[in-house]
Image: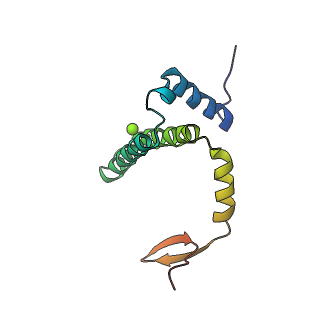
């Protein structure tokens, strides 16, 4: 029996790839970046709705998962390695300073703030 390692990024990416293949997204417009941006905005709106309407954490988690699946699929659609991009960006983010701005923390390079 084939088992899936639910802790593995590669397994997650493989099932997103299988989802794309199942519906032939590459040849049916499902991997067009403009369309994907619209879908990601739609899911972000659903996440926002969960927060502003006080929906359950379960509902919020489902919408965040929808967005993650779209993000991973966008890496497939645009032919980049999202895991590599994540680690490269995270390494840079971990070097950045934070400031309190209007009562909330912000981590940024603050290049245009002076
Ligand atoms: Mg959704």
Relative vertical location of residue 26 with respect to residue 40 in this rendering, above or below: above
Residue 52, position as x, y percentages in the image: 31, 53
Q: Nearer the viewer, residue 42 or 35?
A: 35
Residue sitting at 51 percent across and 21 percent down? 22
Ligand 1 position by quadrant: top left
35 lies left or right of 113: left
Q: Position of residue 25 (x, y in %)?
A: 48, 28
Residue at screen point 58% across, 73% down: 109
Tally the numbered discs.
0
The answer to whether residue 72 is visible is: yes
Query: Residue 78: image x %, image y %?
Result: 56, 42
Percent x, y of residue 85: 65, 51
- Quarter containing the N terminus: top right
Q: Quadrant of residue 96?
A: bottom right
Question: Along the line of sight, which residue is nearer the eye, 27 or 103?
Answer: 27
- Position above or below: 103 against 30: below
Q: Residue furthest front?
A: 27
Q: Is residue 48 above or below residue 110?
A: above
């Amino acid at each position: 029996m084939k088992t899936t390692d639910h802790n593995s990024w590669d397994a997650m990416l493989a099932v997103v790839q299988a989802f794309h293949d199942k519906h032939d997204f590459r040849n049916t417009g499902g991997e067009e970046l403009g369309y994907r941006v619209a879908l990601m905005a739609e899911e972000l709106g659903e996440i926002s709705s969960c927060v502003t309407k006080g929906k359950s954490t379960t509902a919020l988690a489902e919408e965040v998962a929808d967005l993650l699946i779209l993000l991973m699929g966008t890496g497939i659609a645009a032919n980049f390695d999202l895991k590599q991009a994540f680690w490269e960006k995270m390494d840079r983010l971990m070097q950045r300073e934070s400031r309190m701005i209007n009562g909330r923390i912000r981590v940024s390079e603050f290049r245009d703030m002076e």
